[in-house]
Amino acid sequence: MKHIYIIFIAVLVLTGFSSCENEENLMILEPQEAAFSLITPESGSSTILNKETPNNTALTFTWEKVNYGTPTIVTYTVQFAASNTEFAAPVDITSSTNTHATITVAELNTRALALGLTPDVEGTIDVRIKSTVGTTLSEPKLSTPITIQLTPYRGVFPKVDLFLVGPGTAAGWSVTSNNMPIYRDPKEPAKQYYTGFFNKDGFKLIEQIGFWAPAYGTNGAKVQYRATEGDTDPGVFPTTASGYYSFEINLEELTYKITPYTGPMTTYVTIGLTGSVLTGNDAGWDTEVPLVKSAFDSHIWKVTQTLKAGKMKFKANNSWDVSWGDNGGDIFIVEAGKYEIWFNDLDGRYMFIPTP
């Protein structure tokens, strides 16, 4: 009987411990303060983001510590939201167990643009801090929100292929055949160039073969972008007479310049490409793949070729007497693949367009 009594007492003790554990797991922690606030930046502060220093710290956020009345780890999350939305769709920026956090110029610029701010125009976003603890059923605590002013810059412009269309070009008004590309600046993708022959009556630019939009034309003084076929059709870039022209366009600033070309116009019998991109080793420099001369413009050349990662150059007339590379050096192909390769012997510009 004594043994049964001892077992009964042990069961009661263990049950009591288990109940205590469950109560602790279900403990609800509430912050002791009625509210907490951001210390920096101040509400209404203004920041102009500088494109030239993307890795610099743009803002440092500091805030008051939240006391939950018992030792516990508190996680703080910086949240952004579009102004005047009451944080209907908050965006988590960074989380920390400290009461401070920083954000770089590049990240703040990306976040600002994603929240609808316009490049080079001052706008506002709302900021708050959310505090949480890991205890089951604990409620998050939100700081008093602030509004800050930001002037973002345009992000890195995407690489866009542009193709010629219109009466001044080899394609005419076809968007499915003979659409020559213009040449993108390898370091500044918003800037593109084309030096070559045009018939009179001008041209436009399309982004995708087979489609009339997106497209670029002009409203006279500036470039006009046509995002969809439902948008207003822009006018042509002017070529008043048949001849050679130099054309420049800045897709970011929507500016262009077109002038008659008066530079040298050497005629080459052949243009070929050579280099380790053909074989994967130095034996490729002893091999040459000929490009095909355009029937519309004898200074524009093209070939479709599978390339390996490596180096290459273009050369004229099967000789090293005249050759072209990247600023005099080799052209580097980083990613192996099949490319539609275009070359312009008037200015040495080239384009590699991936193709199936």
Image: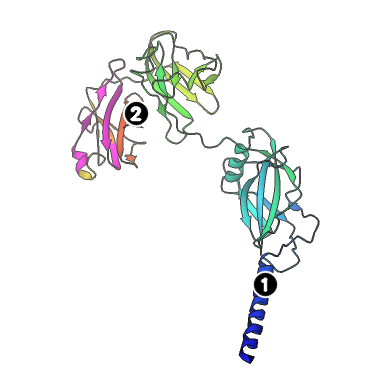
Of the pair 321 and 298, the residue shown nearer to us: 298
> Can see residue 25?
yes
Position of residue 205 in the picture relative to residue 281 (left or right)? right
**Which residue appears at 66% of the width and 48% of the height?**
79
Query: Where is residue 249 drawn, in percent x and y?
Result: 48, 24
- Residue 284 belongs to the span the image colors magenta: yes
Residue 300's place in the image compared with 329, above or below, is: above
The kind of secondary structure element at disc 1 is helix
Position of the C terminus by quadrant: top left
Of the pair 142 and 100, the residue shown nearer to us: 142
Q: Quadrant of residue 28?
A: bottom right
Q: CA distance from mark 1 to mark 2?
A: 81 Å
Badge 2 amino acid: Gly
Q: Quadrant of residue 327?
A: top left
Q: Which label belongs to residue 19?
A: 1
Query: Where is residue 284 drawn, in percent x and y?
Result: 21, 40
Badge 1 amino acid: Ser
**Which residue appears at 76% of the width and 42% of the height?**
44
Position of residue 278 in the picture relative to residue 170 (left or right)? left
The stretch in magenta equals 283-312
